[in-house]
């Protein structure tokens, strides 16, 4: 009886081992088949659909960046009107495009579409103070590396945004981060390489793990357009202000030394700075960066499908994919992890929301001081206080995920900004009293976006009408011209 049991057990084990071996061989064969290249990707190929013929899993997962259904406590992958949620931002950005329109960012696949749709660009893509440079396209499309290669970098920055309308039709994609011959991660935007050079660092020595963040740092950073760059011939040259360091005070000093301002605030007359999205800089101040965790580890975690391990190119919030993003390192329950994230976000949000209202009031009080005859010397320190406090507030608010990436640094920055604006408003109170105004300055309705836009003189009906014409008449022509051009770009099949 024992012999029969031993025989049966042996047969079962042999069958299971055979099945395992067969499965492994099938998976290896599948891998060879799945990654057998079908087309030759040559040069700066901007079309993700062509790359997708060779890398279907990565391409299919990238296409999910069009998904707009994700919602967390504060964020979404869909449409969200931030000005409607926080109307006082209209005052903070008076005189600048963001006072017209500021929406929550959607996925990479929407990059070009959202540039067309935003009211920050007019018809054809002109704000109130003149045409927008083609530099604004730099981080929106995989067509940009191609154009820089064909035209030259400075020449690209010298054009207007509308000049490139039919050339820029593909959103952010494969060509932005990958070498087509080796598939290695690569830097395609010269501004990052140039910033490293000025800091005395060689980006070519970056490790693969570092590159899994640096390809993101091509765009998810603070930047400005430098018209005075030697050799730029007046072009709006994309520049990262890191020469003095990556901290908020370092960049503040950089801009102050150069006398740079993104715009002059029409109410307070303060020379203002607009933080773009210093995501990488704030991430570098957080615990994950110190532990060697890259952007891709959390936002593009590995997946396994059909026995194949690959990087998930559905770039988005880790909270939409906690199992693959967080559980690689953490062993807490999902609810506990979410609670930790939301607690950090909530505390930073509390500080930023109180601060933005204080700054908005400061701009209006400064306008009152000018109205009553304040002298420029009286206003010098006040204007700098408005500039510095709003810059620091914006540095935190404009960063995607900064409240989680570096909550301690974010809180420190907001605290310093609160100190600055409180001191600034005390100076304003004293100045207003000297000018004979001892009552509180009258404030507009901070609960209504439309009321505040009217308060600063915006004709939003006109802007929306211009945009409607632009979307109906100009954009379709651009897209059709671009698609016709791409039909003439050959796709070389591999036999």
Image (cartoon, grey):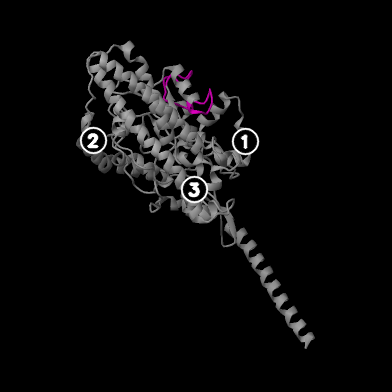
Span of residues in magenta: 227-248
Which one is in front, 121 or 371?
371
Left-right relation of 365 to 152: left
Residue position marked by numbered label 1 in the rendering? 206
- Contact between labelled residues 2 and 3, with CB atoms less than 8 Å apart: no
Position of the N terminus by quadrant: bottom right
Q: Nearer the viewer, mark 1 or mark 3?
A: 3
Query: How many residues crowd around disc 3 within 10 Å: few (fewer than 14), some, or many (20 or more)?
Result: few
Q: Give the Cα distance between marks 1 and 3.
A: 32 Å
Instruction: Pinpoint residue 342: horizontal percent, then vertical percent.
Output: 45, 47
Q: Going 40% across and 29% down the picture, which residue do you hit?
A: 418
- Contact between labelled residues 3 and 1, with CB atoms less than 8 Å apart: no
| Residue 460 lies in quadrant | top left
Left-right relation of 472 to 66: left
Q: Secondary structure at mark 3?
A: helix
Mark closer to the chain start, 1 or 2: 1
Mark closer to the chain start, 3 or 2: 3
Instruction: Pinpoint residue 371: horizontal percent, then vertical percent.
Output: 22, 17
Is residue 102 positioned above or below 40 on the image?
A: above
Instruction: Pinpoint residue 413: horizontal percent, then vertical percent.
Output: 46, 31
Q: Secondary structure at mark 2?
A: helix
Residue 463 - label: 2
Residue position marked by numbered label 3 in the rendering? 340
Q: Count every numbered label the image shows and give the total.
A: 3
Q: Going 26% across and 13% down the picture, which residue do you hit?
A: 434
Q: Going 44% across and 43% down the picture, which residue do you hit?
A: 345
| Residue 461 lies in quadrant | top left
Query: How many residues crowd around disc 1 within 10 Å: few (fewer than 14), some, or many (20 or more)?
Result: few
Q: Nearer the viewer, mark 3 or mark 2?
A: 3
Position of the C terminus by quadrant: bottom right
Which one is in front, 366 or 208?
366
């Amino acid at each position: 009886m024992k012999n029969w049991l031993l025989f049966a057990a042996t047969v079962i084990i042999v069958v299971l081992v055979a099945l395992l071996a067969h499965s492994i061989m099938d998976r290896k064969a599948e891998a060879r088949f799945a990654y057998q290249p079908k087309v030759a990707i040559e040069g700066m190929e901007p079309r993700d659909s062509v790359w997708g013929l060779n890398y279907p899993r990565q391409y299919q997962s990238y296409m999910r960046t069009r998904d707009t259904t994700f919602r967390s406590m504060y964020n979404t992958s869909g449409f969200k009107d931030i000005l409607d949620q926080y109307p006082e931002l209209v005052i903070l950005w008076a005189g600048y495009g963001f006072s017209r329109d500021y929406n929550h960012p959607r996925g990479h696949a929407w990059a070009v579409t959202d540039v067309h749709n935003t009211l920050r660009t007019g018809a054809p893509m002109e704000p109130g103070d003149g045409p927008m440079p083609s530099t604004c396209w730099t981080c929106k499309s995989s067509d940009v590396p191609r154009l820089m290669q064909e035209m030259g970098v400075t020449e690209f920055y010298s054009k207007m945004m509308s000049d490139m309308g039919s050339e820029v039709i593909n959103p952010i994609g494969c060509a932005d981060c990958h070498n087509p011959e080796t598939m290695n991660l690569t830097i395609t935007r010269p501004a990052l390489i140039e910033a490293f050079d000025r800091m005395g660092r060689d980006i070519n020595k970056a490790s693969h793990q570092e590159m899994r963040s640096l390809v993101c740092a091509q765009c998810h950073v603070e930047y400005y357009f430098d018209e005075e760059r030697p050799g730029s011939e007046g072009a709006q040259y994309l520049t990262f202000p890191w020469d003095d360091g990556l901290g908020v005070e370092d960049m503040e000093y950089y801009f102050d030394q150069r006398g740079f301002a993104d715009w002059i605030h029409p109410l307070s007359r303060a020379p203002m700075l607009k933080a773009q999205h210093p995501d990488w800089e704030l991430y570098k101040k957080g615990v994950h960066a110190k532990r060697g965790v890259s952007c891709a580890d959390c936002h593009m975690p590995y997946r396994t499908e059909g026995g194949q391990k690959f990087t998930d190119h559905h770039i988005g919030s880790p909270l939409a994919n906690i199992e693959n993003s967080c559980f690689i390192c953490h062993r807490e329950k999902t609810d506990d992890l979410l609670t930790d994230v939301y607690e950090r976000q909530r505390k930073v949000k509390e500080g930023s929301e109180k601060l933005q209202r204080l700054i908005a009031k400061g701009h209006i009080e400064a306008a009152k001081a000018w109205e009553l005859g304040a002298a420029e010397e009286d206003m010098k320190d006040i204007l700098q206080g408005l500039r510095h406090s709003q810059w620091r507030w914006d540095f935190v608010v404009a960063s995607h995920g900064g409240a989680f990436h570096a909550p301690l640094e974010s809180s420190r920055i907001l605290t310093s900004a609160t100190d600055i604006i409180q001191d600034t408003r005390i100076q304003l109170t004293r100045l207003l009293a000297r000018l004979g105004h001892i009552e509180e300055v009258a404030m507009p309705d901070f609960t209504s976006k439309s009321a505040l836009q009217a308060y600063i003189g915006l004709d939003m009906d006109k802007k929306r009408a211009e945009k409607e014409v632009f979307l109906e008449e100009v954009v379709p022509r651009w897209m059709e011209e671009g698609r016709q051009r791409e039909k003439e770009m050959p796709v070389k099949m591999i036999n």
